[in-house]
Image (cartoon, grey):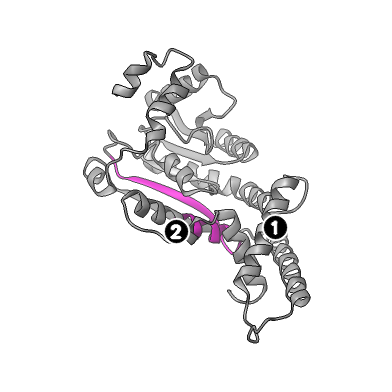
C-alpha cells in the first residue's frame, strides 16, 4: 500500500495500472495458503460429465484425431529412420524425438491458425459439437437448482447455447469481450438481481477475472480451457468469499476424444500450481504446456505406447 500511495495516482488515472504493476505486482505475490482460505469458502466440486459424440460430425472429429496422430507418427518414424535407432530396444519410443515432433507441430499449428486441421481447430470443433448438449444440460440444471453460469471459449459455441436457451424459454445475459464496461455491468447486475434471468452465458477469456456472479452456485464449462488458471478463474466468479452455497462446476467432456486428455492435463497442472504457490518443490519438467502435452499424448497413442 505504501508503494501505491507513493505513486500519487488513483484508479481514475490512466497511468495508475502500469504504475501499480511496477510498484506492487512485480514485487511478487502475497497470498494465503489454500488451507487458510478454505474456512472462509463453501465446498467446491468439479464434476465431469462425459458425452458421446456419436453423430457424423462426432465421428469426423475422431477421424481427424487419428489422422493427426498418424501424421505425427510418420514424422517421428522419418527422424528415427534418418538417424538410426541408436540402441533403442524393439518397440521402445524415444521421448526426446516425441517432444521434438510435438513442438514442431505446435509451432506450425500456431502459425497456421484456423487455416488447416490442427490441435486448435480440432478442439474448437469438439466445442461446437458439444454446444447444444452442454446447453441442454445447463437448461435442465437451471430448472432444478436455479441460476447457472455457462462458460464457453468460442463465440460460435456461446451463440449456439444462447439459441438453445431462447428456444427453451430461458432468459439469459451475455458477457463477452467486445462489450463496453457499462454493458457488462448491466448484464452482471441483471443476473444477480433479476429473478427472471436464468443463465449467464460467459466467455472463458473475457469473464474469467473480476466478476461477481454469486447469485449462482452451479457452473457449466461447455469447453475446456488450455490452462488450469483460466478454469479456476471462471469457477471463482461463483466460488468466492460471500458465497454461502456449495459450488459445483460441471465440465462437459467429449468421450473418446482428446478432450478427456486435456481435462486430465488441466487437473495435473492445477495440482502442481497449488503446490508451487504453497511453497512446495515441483518437477521443472511439469512446465510443458497443455497443448504440447496433448500432442505428445496423441503421438504416443499413434505409436502404440498408450491406449
| Magenta span includes 258 | yes
- Nearest to viewer (mark 1 / mark 2): 1
Left or right: 206, with 160 as reference point? left
Residue drawn at the location 57% of the way across and 57% of the way down: 259
Tag 1 secondary structure: helix
What label does residue 104 carry, if any?
1
Q: Which residues are magenta?
A: 245-267
Residue found at the far bottom of this picture: 90
In this figure, which residue is indicated by the disc labeled 2? 268
Q: Residue at x 66, y 61 (%)?
A: 102
- Can residue 202 be seen at all in this image of the molecule? yes
The percent position of residue 230, horizontal first and vertical second, equals 48, 43
- For this rendering, which residue is in front, 30 or 146? 30
Q: Which mark is residue 115?
A: none
Q: Classify mark 2: residues with Cα within 10 Å, few (<14), some (14-19) or many (20+).
A: some
How packed mark 1 is, by other alpha carbons closer than 10 Å (few <14, some 14-19, many 20 or more), is: few
Give the CA separation, mark 1 to mark 2: 24 Å
Amino acid at each position: 500500500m505504501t508503494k501505491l500511495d507513493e505513486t500519487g495516482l488513483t484508479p481514475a488515472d490512466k497511468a495508475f495500472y502500469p504504475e501499480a504493476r511496477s510498484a506492487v505486482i512485480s514485487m511478487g505475490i502475497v497470498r494465503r495458503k489454500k488451507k487458510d482460505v478454505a474456512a472462509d469458502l463453501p465446498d467446491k466440486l468439479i464434476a465431469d460429465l462425459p458425452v458421446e459424440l456419436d453423430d457424423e460430425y462426432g465421428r469426423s472429429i475422431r477421424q481427424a484425431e487419428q489422422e493427426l496422430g498418424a501424421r505425427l507418427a510418420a514424422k517421428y518414424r522419418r527422424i528415427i529412420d534418418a538417424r538410426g535407432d541408436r540402441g533403442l530396444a524393439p518397440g521402445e519410443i524415444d521421448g526426446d524425438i516425441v517432444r521434438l515432433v510435438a513442438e514442431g507441430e505446435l509451432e506450425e499449428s500456431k502459425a497456421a491458425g484456423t487455416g488447416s486441421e490442427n490441435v486448435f481447430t480440432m478442439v474448437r470443433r469438439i466445442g461446437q459439437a458439444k454446444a447444444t448438449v452442454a446447453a441442454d444440460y445447463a437448461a435442465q440444471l437451471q430448472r432444478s437448482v436455479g441460476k447457472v453460469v455457462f462458460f464457453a471459449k468460442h463465440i460460435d459455441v456461446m451463440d449456439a447455447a444462447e439459441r438453445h436457451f431462447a428456444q427453451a424459454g430461458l432468459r439469459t445475459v451475455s458477457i463477452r469481450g467486445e462489450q463496453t464496461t457499462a454493458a457488462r455491468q448491466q448484464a452482471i447486475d441483471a443476473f444477480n438481481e433479476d429473478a427472471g434471468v436464468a443463465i449467464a452465458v460467459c466467455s472463458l477469456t473475457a469473464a474469467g477475472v473480476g466478476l461477481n456472479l454469486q447469485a449462482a452456485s452451479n457452473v457449466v464449462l461447455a469447453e475446456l480451457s488450455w490452462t488450469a488458471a483460466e478454469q479456476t478463474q471462471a469457477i471463482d466468479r461463483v466460488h468466492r468469499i460471500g458465497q454461502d452455497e456449495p459450488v459445483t462446476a460441471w465440465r462437459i467432456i467429449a468421450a473418446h476424444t482428446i478432450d478427456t486428455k486435456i481435462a486430465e492435463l488441466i487437473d495435473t497442472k492445477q495440482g502442481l500450481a497449488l503446490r508451487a504457490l504453497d511453497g512446495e518443490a515441483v518437477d521443472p519438467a511439469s512446465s510443458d504446456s497443455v497443448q504440447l502435452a496433448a500432442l505428445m499424448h496423441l503421438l504416443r497413442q499413434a505409436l502404440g505406447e498408450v491406449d
